[in-house]
Amino acid sequence: MDLLDLIISYGPWSWIIGGLILLGVELIVPGGVVVWLGGAAIIVGLITLMQPVPWAMQWLLYGVLSIVSLFAWLNYSRRNRGEESDRPFLNKRALRYIGQEAVLEEPISGGRGRISLDDSVWRVIGPDLPEGARVRVTGADGAVLRVEAA
């Protein structure tokens, strides 16, 4: 009860201090959730600074603000997560070669060989084929291209 009495004695400042602590926690454990709880606490503190509000209403207001801000953030982040990029293969260089044809520089023997595309030599996996055979890229496993006879 001493802690509760201490919190009550600070009134609106307990909300603001609690909100700032939650914002500090967000810096240590980022995730975008605690910041909304801290923001809601600060808003409740500012409201109660201007207008005295019973404790029960303060907690209700805090709960509503927390839930509304969390759902607003989740909606916003969900909508912006799937934005189309004008460079979809920027960090997936191997995937942009899917469908292209090339000539084997080294035969595919034991399932492995090499081709040259653009200015790079790529390791390939696929059916055994002789050097000089035309192949088509069908996929990529990291930096290794999967090919088939063209």
Image (spheres, rainbow, N blue to C red):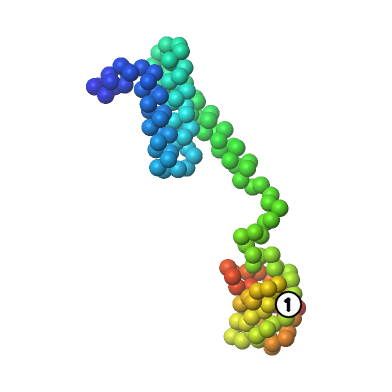
Q: Quadrant of residue 91?
A: bottom right
Residue 83 visible here: yes
Considering depth in this image, is 39 or 33 the residue closer to the camera? 39
User: Quadrant location of residue 101?
Assistant: bottom right
| 13, above or below 100, in the image | above
- Whether residue 124 is visible: no
Query: Where's residue 48, x and y in %?
Result: 43, 15
| Quadrant the C terminus occupies | bottom right
As drawn, which residue projects farthest toward the bottom?
A: 130
Q: Position of residue 78 (x, y in %)?
A: 60, 42
- Are there few (<14), some (14-19), or many (20+) residues within 10 Å of tag 1? many
On screen, 131 above or below 139?
A: below
| Quadrant for the N terminus in the image | top left
Reply above or below: 29 against 68: below
Residue appearing at x 52%, y 33% in the figure: 70
Of 91 and 76, nearer the camera is: 91
Q: Is residue 3 left or right of residue 148?
A: left
Mark 1 element type: strand
Q: Decide: is 52 above or below 101.
A: above
Q: Residue at x 56, y 38 (%)?
A: 74
Q: Residue 66: x, y in percent? A: 48, 29
**What amino acid type should be assigned to the residue bearing mark 1?**
Ala
| Farthest residue, direction top | 52
Q: Give coordinates of residue 146: x percent, y percent.
A: 64, 74
Q: Residue at x 64, y 67 (%)?
A: 94
x 62%, y 62%: residue: 92
Residue designated by label 1: 102
Query: Extreme left residue here?
Result: 2
